[in-house]
Structure formats: structure tokens, C-alpha cells
Amino acid sequence: LQIAKDLPRHQLSIYHCAPLASRLERMLFIWSVRHPAASYVQGFDDIVAVFFTTFLTERLALAMARHRQQGRDAAADRHRSRLAGGRLQS
């Protein structure tokens, strides 16, 4: 529950991207399950993000590029829909 509250507040917006956020959430969840005495506390996401970024920089770049492309594709689809809707009404 606390993990779900912390991730949207993460300082780095890269972790607001759904695929990356879900991976980070999974890592934090696994940590809390495997270390029940420590569990999860606020701020662990900041610590794990450092390792996540360090070891997965190349994969993060590819994931962010895909995320940006999906956003552009969705915007283009909305634009085409508006244009098509305007032509149908004319």
C-alpha cells in the first residue's frame, strides 16, 4: 500500500512512465516480501531507483523512447480522429 503511494510522488519523472513504475513497484514489493523485518518504508523507492537507473540505463533509454513514441502515436491518432470527424460533419 505504501509503495503505491510513494511511486507517483517519485522525484524523477522517468518513474512515472507506466512500464518503469510497474518494474520499480515489483522490485520494491519483492524486497518487502523477502525482508519482512525491514518490510518497506517511505523512501526505499529513492534508494532502489539509483540501482535501477545505474544497472539498466540502456534499457531505460529504450523504454522511454518507446513510451514517447506511443505518446506521439496516440496524439497523432487523436488528431486524425478529429480531422475525420470534421470531414464527416461537413
Image: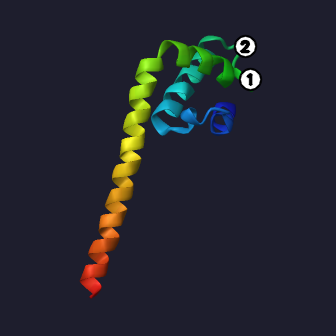
Distance from label 2 to label 1 (Cα)?
Answer: 8 Å
In the shown orientation, is residue 64 left or right of residue 3?
left
Q: How many C-alpha atoms fall within 10 Å of the one at disc 2: few (<14), some, or many (≥20)?
A: few
Looking at the picture, which amino acid does disc 2 mark?
Ala
Looking at the picture, which amino acid does disc 1 mark?
Val
Please name the residue that numbered disc 2 is placed on: 38
What residue is rendered at 37% in x and 36% in y? 66
Q: Quadrant of the N terminus?
A: top right
What residue is rendered at 72% in x and 13% in y? 38
What residue is rendered at 37% in x and 54% in y? 74
Q: How is the image coloured?
A: rainbow
Secondary structure of the residue carrying numbered label 1:
loop
Q: Which mark is residue 41?
A: 1
| Residue 63 x, y percent position in the rendering | 41, 30
Q: 62 or 23: which is nearer to us?
A: 62
Q: Quadrant of residue 82?
A: bottom left
**Is there CB contact under 8 Å for labels 2 and 1?**
yes
| Residue 11 x, y percent position in the rendering | 67, 33
Question: Considering only vertical position in the picture, is 89 above or below 34?
Answer: below
Q: Quadrant of the C terminus?
A: bottom left
Secondary structure of the residue carrying numbered label 2:
loop
Query: Depth-wise, is mark 2 or mark 1 nearer the camera?
Result: 1
